[in-house]
Amino acid sequence: MAEKKAIVIGGGIAGMSAAKVLADHFDKVILLERDLYPDTIGGRRGVPQGRMFHTLLERGRREIEDIFPGFHKLLDERKMPKVSFGFNCALMTPRGWTRNVPIPIQRSLFCTRGMLETTMRDLFKDDPRIETHEQTNVMGLVAEGSGDRARCTGVRALKKGADAPEVMLGDLIIDASGANSKAAMWLKEVGVEPPKEETLDPLLTYGGQLYRLKEGLEFPKEWWWTHGAFIQRVPPSDNKAAHLIRQESGLWLLTLVAGDGLDLPEDEDGIADFVGGMRSPLISGMLPYFEPVDIFTRYRLPSNRWRYYEKWEQNFPGFLAIGASTCVFNPNQGQGMSVAAADAGILKACLQKTASPAALPKLFFKEQAHFQKNAYRLAVANDLKFTAVQGKRTIGIKLFNWYREQQTAAGLADTYVARKVGEVDLLLKPVSSLFHPVIMARTLFARLFLFWRANPTQQESVAALPPPPAEIPKRWRNELRTAAAYVYRTITYKAGLAR
């Protein structure tokens, strides 16, 4: 029998995840990556956004652990810091500083993009079913037939140092080359009309730089935000945001965000002026404790883009697109890597139903779009809160943004509402779940009758520095001691150590 082969274009998070999934269904998987992977923990030259803030949402964390068993254990061994807002990280939202908590409610995975990719690659590179070709650029697709009878059968790939492209044939070709995918051009070259798309420019520029604490310096003891600080933008016109977050290996990452097409500074004085002009001086007061370890890198965010593969009229068996190759959005909610990993999880579920090159594309594109539309809607709706963004603000968008504001406020008074909103933001539940009758009723009740608990005071909303660290109330401490004593007595009695 002929050997079944799959080819994945792009060796980032989406590409590695897809290749790992495909290895269970194909005899050989070929991964084509344009960059040279670093020998140690580090980023790739072809990922300019790699120096910016990255995180894995809960959905992405679960998907990667499922595809790459041992992922979190390896991250822990590499001493990746765990950040919890309100516990060891200060967060200033448009409403002001979030409330502090005495214990971590949820710890998020914060480390450099290079650390995440390297950890995945270390769990991936020894798989004998996957053949990786680095420094290889895909120049186009190979197809048989034409029109509705066209079928994708391979790629033309140019390896570094080669004189001409090499034709690589496969039963399934997956475009995981990211936001700058050239799939539209490749499809036209083989006579296939690419899917329609929509775009929205968020007018954002990101910048990032790595720091270390200066030798001999430590944070003041009253600074409970030992893992960093976030200051978010405030719609409709506050276009400055900044994050200073602890990373692995003693590194800290400063990320600056400028909206309205504004530029970002590059020199030390310009960075100090930028953070000094924000609505809180917290990060400005932290920076003197640090020294840079590399140069400041700027990145102009591409437009939000939705490629309608799920409505693609052209039938092109043997070709799939995954992750940012199909859907690109503003990363202000940290969704990008999690969506890429979840798309690979969807591919895994679809392959369990069919591996037919003819039937798989329609099934996968439908399921992928059903999931991706949640992240895309959240990103686009948030971008349209800012007056500088030029886009159509429909009645539906305006109502949705208003409803989200009410739920955010209600969540400050009702933890049930806050939890349900959090599940949507973490991509665990679809946006439609926010309109469940129970959630809507509790949102209304909290806004009407618990408003005094939901709205921060004027002093809280404009406070320059975070509130002092939260403490466990004395009554709770007594109850915890009583419970611990009861558990201790029970265990010792069952073990026969006490009578």
Image: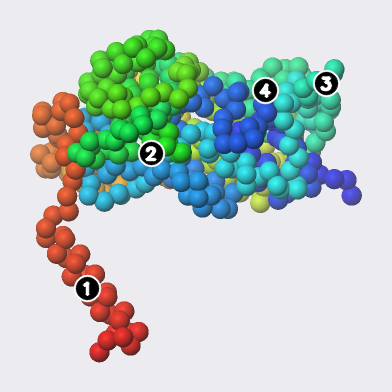
Indicate the quadrant where residue 150 lies: top right
Q: Distance between the residues labelled 2 and 4?
A: 30 Å
Q: Distance between the residues labelled 3 and 4?
A: 23 Å
Left or right: 342 with respect to 83? Answer: right
* Disc 3 residue type (three-letter): Ala
Precedes in sequence: disc 2 or disc 4: 4
Task: State the residue position of label 4.
Answer: 183
Precedes in sequence: disc 1 or disc 4: 4
Q: Distance between the residues labelled 3 and 2?
A: 46 Å
* Disc 2 residue type (three-letter): Asp
* Disc 1 residue type (three-letter): Ala
Q: What element carries label 3?
A: loop
In the image, residue 288 above or below residue 361:
above
Q: Which mark, by number, is residue 485?
A: 1
Residue in the image at 26% along x and 51% along y: 103
Task: State the residue position of label 2.
Answer: 425
Q: Distance between the residues labelled 3 and 1?
A: 72 Å
In the image, residue 384 above or below residue 214:
above
Left or right: 25 with respect to 168? Answer: left
* Label pair 3/1, CB-CB below 8 angstroms: no
Task: State the residue position of label 3.
Answer: 162
* Label pair 2/4, CB-CB below 8 angstroms: no
Between residue 57 and residue 122, name the one nearer to us.
122
Precedes in sequence: disc 3 or disc 4: 3
